[in-house]
């Protein structure tokens, strides 16, 4: 267990004292923690299968249908009633004649036959993954009901499953982009502010030019060359996002480099790198932390807007922005718009509350009762 | 006795011009501030050399150049016979650098508020990859604090205690020379004497050499073996302590002594020094002190006096004798 320094303990107390921020953190952690296990919450494969006494975990592993006594060597379609019947009955050929009747009989314990060995399946709460086509009659988008709590989208995919996966993807994407671009931005700002003078001057001009590059065009062009993908989008967002923190860190370092203890460290013969990152950065960190929430929410919003415009993640990935677009295109299906709106509202509000609490906890002038 | 530090013809010029665009628009020339000009002195091993002068006289700039925080514009600082600015061998320079440490004026600003005292004190050693186990505790006791203080943060100490921490830090790499930049001017008078006594004791025990920078004559009288008086970046007088205090040669030194408050001078009407220290960007011609000097002649505004040796004193004045 890492022991917190008295200062950090005080900050933690301050954060605890801020009820709104603390409970936002709890709720967000629970939601994000659950979404990390999205495969167990919403999936079109059972979590655990017992077939003829043996256990199978289709969530993790590929099993061809032949494993369960079927005909195909492709992956077993667990939602198919014949496959379900095969698993439940222990692979009886009779399943190919009247699977619905047999499944019903097995459930009522009325089924008797030679070679019958009762199996079972544990399904996730939502038996659809984000890309599962829902087998329901009617034209998409289907309204909520009959197993789809929030209805389906215009490609007959379960909205709730897509929201769970999309939430996870947004948050992970935001974390990756924010952390990487903050690290780059902090190092760049630190070098600029610490050395100042000509380095600073040249770097500032470079940043002005870099900031004037139209990032949307670059993203579109790069997608045209390399194709769409999660990592290339993350890379491009970092390439154009790292400048966000530079100005702030640079200002902090310009202020701190003339502080007496920094001079003292220089006079003691401490290396520049150590001075920058062990002496100055901890003191510049508070201002940096204040800026971070804007970066995180900014990344989430820009990912959503790119998706909305159709220049975001590949169409195969669950994205909230794409759902917004569907909501706009299908005004007759309000569950789409409302669901995704609620998701964004809750996610961004929780994040803002948390970061507000973090910022206040780091503010040395603020006192809490 | 041999000299451990030789300061030769040391000069430092700061560029204080306005930004390029302003200069072009307002047609201003570049302007330079000569903070230190052709300063020459030697510091003997195990002695205390004090630099005194008014604000802006270049004391701290010399201190920073000796430590290596600033580069000299011309001239050289030789430590143990090695010129730090021109020596090519990085190992030699580093060895010399670790022999010089510095104590700063403000003990409230010169300690990183986020570090524990243990890390602060051990830093000069840790920065060179040395073994720091138990070092801070030993040094804390040496400067009159307790070893248990190592786990505290700087804000838990008073000014005098903090200055002791600074002293402990400067001792950590076992230096031979310590540059003290007004080490007591931020402290209460009662605490000043404790810190000064500590510094004297350490100097004797560890065989240190101090370059002591101060504007406080009583402190200098207490500490120094030899004193250099600076005026506008130039050394105007240099003498052993007793000689200087008994018979100051330069009119500026005399003026400083007259202005200093004295215990036996209660009720005495003090004559304040006349005039301000002149603008260092446009220093007066000839002897820089002539506008304020009570004895100035026409010659003083024309030619600059060279350093002359009178007895034990070196003085730069046409009229001194």
Image (tube, coloured by chain):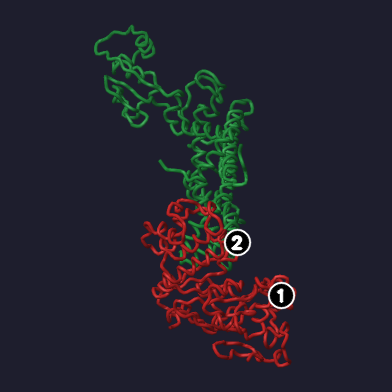
A272 left or right, relative to A355:
left
| Front residue (pair B314, A80) | B314
In the rendered image, residue A136, in percent from the top left (x then y), is placed at 50, 20
Give the structural element (helix, strand or loop) at label 1: helix
In the rendered image, residue B184, in percent from the top left (x then y), is placed at 57, 66
The C terminus of chain B is located in which quarter?
bottom right
Question: Dot 2, crowdedness within 10 Å: few (<14), some or many (≥20)?
Answer: few
Which residue matches tag 2? B188
Q: Residue furthest top?
A: A110
Residue at x-position 59% and y-position 75%: B59
Chain B, chosen colour in render: red
Give the structural element (helix, strand or loop) at label 2: loop
Which residue matches tag 1? B24
Chain seen in green: A
On whether disc 1 and disc 2 are found on a single subunit, the reply is yes
| Front residue (pair A37, B51) | B51
Q: How many marks?
A: 2
């Amino acid at each position: 267990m890492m022991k917190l320094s008295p200062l950090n303990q005080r900050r933690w107390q301050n954060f605890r004292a801020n009820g709104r921020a603390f409970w936002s953190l709890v709720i967000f952690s629970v939601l994000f923690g659950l979404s990390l296990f999205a495969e167990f919450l919403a999936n079109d494969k059972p979590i655990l299968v017992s077939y003829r006494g043996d256990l199978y975990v289709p969530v993790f592993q590929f099993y061809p249908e032949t494993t369960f006594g079927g005909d195909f060597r492709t992956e077993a379609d667990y939602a198919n009633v014949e496959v379900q019947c095969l698993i439940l009955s222990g692979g009886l050929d009779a399943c190919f004649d009247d699977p619905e009747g047999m499944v019903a009989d097995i459930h009522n314990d009325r089924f008797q036959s030679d070679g019958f060995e009762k199996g079972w399946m544990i399904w996730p709460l939502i038996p659809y993954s984000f890309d599962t086509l829902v087998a329901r009659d009617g034209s998409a988008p289907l309204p909520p009901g009959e197993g789809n709590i929030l209805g389906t989208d215009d490609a007959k995919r379960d909205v709730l499953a897509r929201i769970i996966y999309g939430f996870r993807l947004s948050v992970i994407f935001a974390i990756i982009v924010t952390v990487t671009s903050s690290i780059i931005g902090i190092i760049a700002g630190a070098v600029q502010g610490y050395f100042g003078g000509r380095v600073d001057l040249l770097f500032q001009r470079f940043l002005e030019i870099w900031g004037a590059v139209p990032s949307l065009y670059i993203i579109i062009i790069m997608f045209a060359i390399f194709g769409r993908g999660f990592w290339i989008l993350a890379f491009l967002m970092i390439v154009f996002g790292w400048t966000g923190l530079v100005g702030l860190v640079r200002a902090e370092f310009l202020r701190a480099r003339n502080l007496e203890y920094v001079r003292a460290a220089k006079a003691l013969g401490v290396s520049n790198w150590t001075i920058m990152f062990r002496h100055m950065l901890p003191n510049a960190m508070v201002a940096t932390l204040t800026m971070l929430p804007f970066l995180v929410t900014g990344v989430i919003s820009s990912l959503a807007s790119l998706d909305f415009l159709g220049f975001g993640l590949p169409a195969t990935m669950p994205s909230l922005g794409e759902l917004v677009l569907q909501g706009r295109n299908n005004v007759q299906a309000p569950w789409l718009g409302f669901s995704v709106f609620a998701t964004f509202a809750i996610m961004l509000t929780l994040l803002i509350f948390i970061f507000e609490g973090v910022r206040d906890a780091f503010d040395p002038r603020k006192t809490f009762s | 006795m041999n000299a451990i530090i030789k300061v030769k013809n040391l000069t430092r010029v700061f560029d204080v011009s306005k930004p390029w665009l302003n200069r072009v628009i307002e047609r201003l020339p570049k302007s330079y501030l000569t903070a230190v000009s052709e300063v020459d002195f030697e510091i003997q091993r195990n002695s205390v050399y004090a630099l005194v002068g008014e604000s802006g006289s270049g004391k701290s700039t010399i201190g920073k150049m000796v430590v290596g925080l600033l580069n000299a514009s011309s001239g050289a600082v030789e430590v143990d016979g090695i010129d730090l600015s021109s020596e090519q061998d990085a190992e030699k320079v580093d060895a010399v650098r670790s022999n010089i440490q510095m104590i700063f004026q403000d003990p409230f600003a010169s300690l990183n508020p986020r570090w524990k005292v243990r890390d602060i004190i051990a830093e000069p050693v840790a920065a060179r990859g040395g073994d720091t186990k138990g070092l801070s505790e030993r040094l804390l006791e040496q400067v009159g604090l307790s070893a248990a203080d190592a786990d505290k943060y700087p804000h838990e100490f008073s000014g005098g205690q903090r200055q002791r921490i600074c002293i402990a830090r400067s001792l950590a790499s076992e230096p031979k020379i310590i540059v003290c930049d007004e080490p007591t001017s931020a402290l209460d008078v009662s605490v000043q004497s404790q810190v000064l006594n500590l510094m004297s004791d350490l100097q004797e025990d560890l065989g240190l050499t101090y370059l002591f920078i101060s504007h406080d004559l009583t402190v200098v009288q207490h500490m120094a073996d030899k004193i250099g008086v600076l005026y506008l970046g130039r050394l105007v007088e240099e003498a052993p302590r007793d000689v200087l205090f008994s018979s100051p040669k330069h009119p500026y030194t005399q003026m400083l002594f007259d202005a200093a408050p004295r215990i036996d001078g209660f009720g005495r009407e003090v004559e304040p020094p006349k005039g301000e220290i002149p603008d260092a960007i446009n220093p007066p011609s000839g002897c820089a002190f002539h506008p304020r000097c009570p004895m100035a002649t026409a010659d003083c505004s024309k030619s600059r006096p060279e350093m002359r040796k009178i007895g034990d004193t070196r003085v730069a004045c046409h009229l001194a004798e």
